[in-house]
Amino acid sequence: MRFIYTKTFLVFATVLVVIFGLLIMQAKGWLQPVEYAVLQAPRPIAATFRTVVSPIKTIVTTLASLRGLVAENGELKARMAELQLKQVEYDKLAGENELLKNELGFVDSTELNLSPCTVLSVDPQDLSDALIINCGESQGIKVGQAVISNGFLVGKIIYVGNITSTALLITSPQSSVDAKISRNNTEGVLKGSFGSGIVFDLVSQNAEVETTDLLVTAGINDRIPAGILIGEVGQVLSGNNDLFKKMSIFSPVRFKTLQYVFIAQ
Amino acid sequence: MKYLIYAIVVICLAALESSVFAVLGTGSFYPSFLLLAVISVALAFDNYDYVFFGLVGGVLFDILYGLPVGSFTIPLIACGVLVTGVIRKILFTDINWQHFILIVIFATLLIHLWLGFYVNLLSITEWSAITLNWMQLLKKLPWSIAANLIFAYPVFVSVEKLAEWNQRFGRNNIRLK
């Protein structure tokens, strides 16, 4: 008997029709309530697994990196002392700034209007680098807005449904965000790269960029406000003969275990 | 009752994939438990139970990964159909461990290629906002194959136990007149 006349083929064809129907419903946004419910199902079990696995991983990694930790501790102490000195200077400047603002009659305002959202799912395998959150059109979310966690940029919204939205993580190779070095306003483009890396690319070869410089959003895109912290400059990846400078960026955010984020509106 | 247990198993597999390996940070070394479950169910059960795993699990994974419906569902069911309808019935009646390894490698390859083709096609036709990077998919492929091969046997044994348990506690169809 030919394969197309078998029951197996009939089952496969029926399933394909069902999937096509679901795909149309998803494209039209009619599947949103179902998606929302489906995304809730594995969350309690996933949270339990996470609770069990996290301490085991911490113990193993701590034991493995004990020697490195001692050296790192020394480095961090030195850096803390340096930062304390900077803090004193910053406090002095902040006081002066406040005084000048008062004299000029400026009104204090919070620059970012943040909407808190719960992360329903993060692509665990770095396939789509998608982050699904429980905020949608009803909360005023729009495509292109910045997603922030602990003050750091983690992605931008690419799809908005009624009750959920999808964001693309900055680690995705498809992602690009305009950014600048906060110290000297050197501009470039922040791009994702394979393996959860982030690179600061298209930077002028003449630009002065040092390791540990802080990278922030440039604010060229009107949906992503300027000054959102992205991370710290790591090693330079480009050579002297390259047209542009390219460097790796270190972000302290653990993208795969995000639980709550804010959307900058 | 059987399908309720299957649904719980699928949800547990989704939770396992989205939590344990994400926390452990194993990088690209990421087994697809659902794919292994579908292959094992197609091999161990002489029925269409793999369709349930493929359809329910596939849709759950599509939503979980933020991908369009069909990204995981279609290749998962295709793998089940290939195992039961082609490999078991037409090519090899007796499946040994070499065949099992080949099936796992082929299925992993099929999923990766399908993901790249299907998601990017839907993105080009503006049905979906997500696009996948081919280079990223292909770089992950050897690691995914290795992870799936390592976890294939434990998953198969677990599914076989489930099949035995299902047979032992399943409804007795013999009726006394």
Image: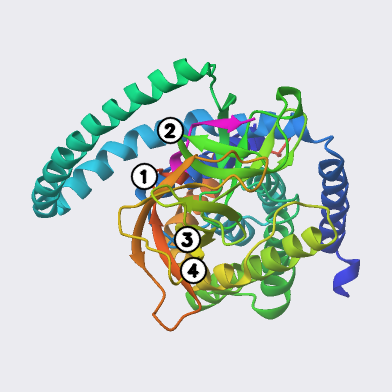
* Residue sitting at x 74%, y 64%: B120
Residue at disc 1, secondary structure: loop
> Can you tell which of label 3 and label 1 is closer to the viewer?
3
Determine whether, in the image, residue A10 is placed left or right of residue A207.
Answer: right
Contact? badges 2 and 4 (CB < 8 Å): no
Query: In this figure, what is the number of numbered marks?
Result: 4
Residue A234, by quadrant, is bottom left
Dividing the image into 4 quarters, which one contains the C terminus of chain A? top right
Could you confirm whether marks 3 and 1 are on the same chain?
A: yes
Pointer 1: what residue?
A252
Work out whether residue A245 or residue B86 is closer to the camera in this orientation and state it: A245
**Alpha carbon distance from label 1 to label 2:** 10 Å
| Labels 4, 3: front one | 4
Q: Position of residue B14 (x, y in %)?
A: 55, 43
What is the secondary structure assignment of the residue under circle 4?
strand
Is mark 1 in CB contact (under 8 Å) with mark 2? yes
Q: Which residue is disc 3 drawn over?
A: A200
Instruction: Report the amino acid beneath label 1.
Output: Pro
